[in-house]
Every structure is written in C-alpha cells, then in structure tokens.
Amino acid sequence: MNAEVVDGKLVSQVLREKMKSRVEALAKRDIKPGLAVILVGDDAASQVYVRNKVAACQAVGVYSVVYRLSEDVSEQNVLDELMRLNNNSEINGILVQLPLPKHIDEDKILEIISPEKDVDGFHKINVGAMVTGNARFYPCTPHGVMKLLEHYGVVIEGKHAVVVGRSNIVGKPMALMLLEKGATVSICTSKTSNLASFTRQADIVVVAVGKPKVLSGAMIKPGATIIDVGINRLADGSLAGDVDFDSVREVAGFLTPVPGGVGPMTITMLLENTIRSSEMEEMRQ
C-alpha cells in the first residue's frame, strides 16, 4: 500500500477561491472584512508568519493591519491597544502573534480580546462554546485538519480517532471537533504508556507533539488516515514532521506531508474566521 498524500496547498487554494466570492459579495454591500495583528518583538519566525498572514489577506481581499510593538513594551500598553481594536468597527478579527515576551501574561492578553473578534478561537468563551457544540470560531489548525478530512472524503462518524498531544491550541480542540463529528476519540500524551497500542487501533491519527518522527509505520494499522501537525527543524537544517513520513506512507491510506499539509490550512482558516466574523457582524446590525 502507498498512501495518498494529502495536498494542503491545493485544498487551501480551493477554499480561498470560495472566500474571494464571499468577500466580493460583502464589498457590494460596502463591507470589507478587517484583520488586525499584534506583533511584539523581533522574533524571526513570528515575523515570517505575520508576513504570510498579511499576504493571504491581500490575496482574498481582506483588509489587514499589523501593529508592531517593541520587545520591552509594557503589558498594559498591549492591553490598551487590544481594547482600542475591540472598539474599532473596521476590525472584525484580532490576532496576537505568539509567543509573547516573558514579562507579558499570555492568558491575560488573549482574554481581553472580544470573543466576537477572537479569530484564533482561543478565548475561554469561544472554547466553552466549542465544548457545547455551538462554536463561533474554531481554532485555526484543528479547523484546517477537519477541512482536509472533509475534502478527501474521510469518514469520521463511527471511526476511532487518536489525537497525540493535548495542547490548548491543537490537541484538545482537535479531540472535541472529532468528537462532535461522531468519532470515538482517544487522547494520548507524553505520559501515555505504550502509545502504539492506541495508534494501531485508530482509523484516524492526528499527531501534534513537536517531536520529530514519533509515529512510525509499525505503529499504525493499514489504511489509516494520518494527519501530521508537527514541524521540526532537524540538525542538518531540514524540516520533518512528527510522523516518519517514509515508513508511514507504506502503510497508511491518507497522509499529510510536512511541509505542504496542515500548514497552509491554518492561515486559510484564519481568513475563514475573519470573513465569518464580518458576516456575523452584518447580521447583528
């Protein structure tokens, strides 16, 4: 068996074309979705991510603005900036690029963002809504995974899904979203004994632990769908996912590559949430 490699770039492109139509429809009613990004400090990776997000916004017609704050900015100044953006009618989505400098309380920053503009889906109100099945916004990376599964016709209902990783950004929301679609869900962590005993039973495995090649072909059942959320820089400078791509490809039915799998979908879902926020704001008026 040789797994079908899931093309995240292609799926992302298809979804963004549909988004353009939604933005054009809003423009006819004099509405333009707007995204504000807060970037604190000079972290190189964060700057690349922000540039990619701004470029994606431009490509589909979403207005974007980046607020660049110094590394030593006070926590209060960041909070004040976010409050101004909460009250800015031209902004439908607010994103704070993580990580933040150590002197800034990340939880406090994320909680001050209006839940109606929390396009990352991290606010406790939005997380709670997701638990009850009434989410306003889903976190972008797991949302992107669900769109990939949908595009490739992967059946979720009645299947056993294993999520490896329990982060608030990917692991926990991923498990909830799979559960909402009718999967039987197991969550494995670094404390799980004999990880392979779980993953060998799974129809769907989502790996998000930030450690290279922790899942091998010997750890999955034939035909399983394997979603690799991790991206790791190896000693030789190359990139690798959390999945051993070569060995897993010989066993799996579907497999996401790194790069080019889940990554493109994360930014696409940020656009989706921003446009959705704009559409919901119009309905409230």
Image (spheres, rainbow, N blue to C red):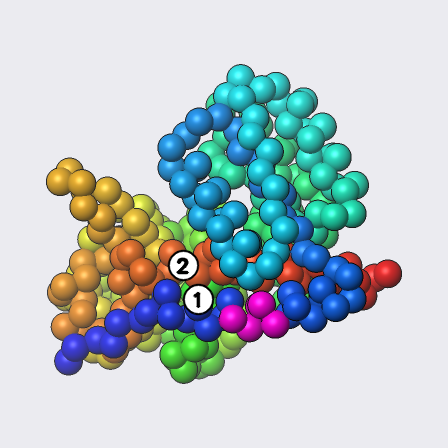
Q: CA distance from mark 2 to mark 1?
A: 6 Å
Q: Residues within 10 Å of mark 1 (few under 14, many from 20)?
A: many
Whether 20 is among the magenta residues is yes
Residue 27 place in picture, x, y as percent? 71, 64
In the rendered view of the protein, which quadrant contains the C terminus?
Answer: bottom right
Whether 146 is among the magenta residues is no
Q: Which residue is disc 1 drawn over? A: 12
> Which secondary structure class fits the magenta region best?
helix
Q: Is residue 192 left or right of residue 101?
A: left
Residue 40 in sight from this viewpoint? yes
Which residue is at 54% across, 54% downward?
58
Which residue is at 51% across, 67% downward?
16
* Contact flag, marks 2 and 1 (Cβ < 8 Å): yes
Q: Residue 276 sits in which quadrant?
A: bottom right
Which residue is at 56% across, 30% downward?
68
Task: Determine whether 61 is above or below 211 in the image.
Answer: below
Task: Determine whether 276 is above or below 122 in the image.
Answer: below
Q: Residues within 10 Å of mark 2 (few under 14, many from 20)?
A: many
Q: At numbered mark 1, what does the secondary structure look like: helix, strand or loop?
A: helix
Sequence-first tag of 2 and 1: 1
Q: Is residue 159 left or right of residue 65?
A: left
Tell me the kind of residue under disc 1. Answer: Ser
Residue 51 place in picture, x, y as percent? 46, 43
Q: Which residue is disc 2 drawn over? A: 264
Residue 59 place in picture, x, y as percent? 52, 58
Task: Determine whether 20 is above or below 44 in the image.
Answer: below
Residue 227 place in picture, x, y as percent? 33, 64
The magenta segment is 17-21
